[in-house]
Amino acid sequence: MAENQEQEENEQNISGESESTESLKKTLEEINDKYVRLYAEFENYKKFTARNKEEQLKYANESIMKDLLTVVDHLELALQHSNDKKTLKSLSEWVELTLKELKTVLEKYGLVSIDASGKPFDPLIHHAITQVESKEANENTVVKELRKGYKYKDRVIRATLVGVAKKPSPTEDVVSDGS
């Protein structure tokens, strides 16, 4: 009898463990299903954000392009009237107006010219391509601006090409004194 009782208890334990195992398997399947769905949603989200970012980059300059169309219109209109000799003076005025409008549009978006003349030479914003002897200007002062430089927001996108003052050579002074 004791053996029968032990056997019944073992069978009950086994059936309890079997039910427990089935319950754990079901829970594991549910968790795995949730994981697979969540992973798929995350992958779809990554693809969506990548496409969205790509589209934003593609059309990032759309507003500046729209604003530049006014400048294009002015230039086209100037070219249409350039054949008439009476309009040479007005063509010059059109070009000035167009340049002014273009600069306004560029400044609106953060592009500004670098003012160099008379300023101390700064290698971060100036590119010296010549030295000019000068008695009036201090040494290493910009005395000649050969091409405008520009900053976009806080970053230099093109350095100003400049001529920088240097002291006159002493040999020229001696020659000029002796004449």
Image: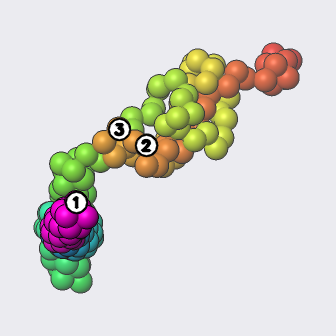
Query: Mark 2: which secondary structure?
Result: strand
What's drawn in magenta, residue-wise? 1-26
From the viewer's side, name the closer residue of 74 and 2: 2
Total numbered badges shown on the rendered structure: 3
- Nearer mark to the viewer, of 2 and 1: 1
Tell me which corner region of the image, top left, top right, bottom left or bottom right, holds residue 74. Answer: bottom left
Query: Mark 3: which secondary structure?
Result: loop
Q: Is residue 95 magenta?
A: no
Q: Residue at x 23, y 83 (%)?
A: 83
**Residue 161 location, x and y as percent?**
54, 45
Residue identifier under label 1: 2
Tell me which corner region of the image, top left, top right, bottom left or bottom right, holds residue 84. Answer: bottom left
Q: Is residue 6 magenta?
A: yes
Residue identifier under label 2: 156
Left or right of 141 on screen, residue 30: left
N-term-proximal mark, 3 vs 1:
1
Residue identifier under label 3: 154
